[in-house]
Image (cartoon, rainbow, N blue to C red):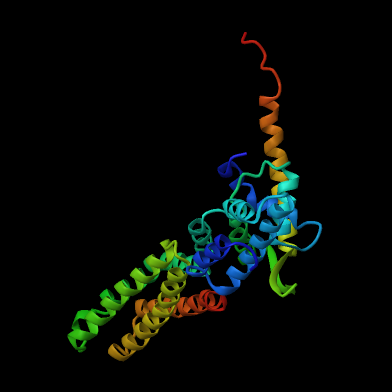
Amino acid sequence: MPGPGLIADYLDALSRQLPGPIVDELADGLEQTYRRHLGLGLAPETAAEAAVAEFGDPELIAAEFSRSHPARRAARRLLATGPPVGACWAAALITGRAWTWPVPALAGIVPGLALVTVITLLAAAATSTRYRSAGRAGTAGCIGVIVLDASMIIGVTAADPALGRAAVMGMAASAARIGFSARLLRPVLTRE
Amino acid sequence: MRAEELKGHLDAMLLAALESGPRHGYAIIEVLRQGTGGRLDLPTGTIYPALRRLEQSGLVSGSWSVVAGRRRRSYRLTAAGRRALAGRRADWREFAATVSAVLERPCPDPA
């Protein structure tokens, strides 16, 4: 962009936090703001200062973009599915007397650790004010939910082939959430 | 006007700025600046994330073009955006009429 280094520095600050297409759009608006101030008779340095001041703090702009990131919305919605899907599985495991299943102890610990990791990722995405962090955590969280739900369906079917009604409900809830997660993940992955 | 007061109405103002046709971010800012008589006291950079939010909600659609070698993103109202604008406008008129009925008329003396 033509103009003083102040504007280049400002765009650099945005580039460190936001993806290229968003910075391109902001650069276009900032250049037009700068030209308007030049047209009002300001010197280039003063016009750049005025344009940057008018645009606002880069941190504030980046935080506003992160609030509208689809990963943030996806994470919040998936977190909301936690209690009902978890309740279905809790009912299935209790009524199926899961503690009597012939599975190695590790098979009980790994899903628990995976669940905590996924919840942490989703919570990070849901509250992050950093655009890239929100996107990365949200993507990982959505994929984690899909893997976790698929693992539950496969694992419970393998451990207890005589599925009770509660297990079928848990599987139906997980299957529905896999579809829901995939639908939420699409705009996250295609986001510019 | 203070930024916080404007913020609650920003989405409706952005939709209104696009009512007459597609515009890019800076042109939308100019419409708001002129429409408010220069009283828009908002960091103009925050208009862009608001436009992306409206796009995500399906109320506007964005498209890229290249102008003088620079990429430019323009927005247009979708059918859902036009319906949302009509709704926000009706709500605003009702709100303004309700508040004005009290604020702009002298209260009768207490009995």
Residue at position x 66%, y 65% in the image: A28
Left or right: residue B50 compared with residue A101 = right
- Between A105 and A63, the residue placed more toward the observer is A63
Q: Residue at x 52, y 65 (%)?
A: A14
Query: Which x, y percent locates residue B101?
Result: 70, 27
Locate the C terminus of chain B by quadrant: top right
Q: Is residue A89 left or right of residue B102?
A: left
Residue nearest the viewer, comparing B105 with B71? B71
Give x and y (percent) for residue A164: 34, 81
On the rendered structure, is A133 left or right of A162?
right
Locate residue B23: give its quadrant. bottom right
Q: Is residue A192 visible?
A: no
Numbered-mark total? 0
| Quadrant location, the N terminus of chain B | top right
The percent position of residue B98, horizontal first and vertical second, equals 68, 32
Q: Residue furthest top?
A: B111
Asked if residue A72 can be seen in this view, the reply is yes
Q: Residue A37 appears at what percent x and percent y? A: 69, 52
Q: Give left or right: position of B84 versus B43.
A: right
Q: Quadrant of residue A147?
A: bottom left
The residue positioned farthest toward the front in the image shown: A43
Q: Does residue A176 sit above or below A29 in this rendering?
A: below
A123 or B24, which lies in front?
B24
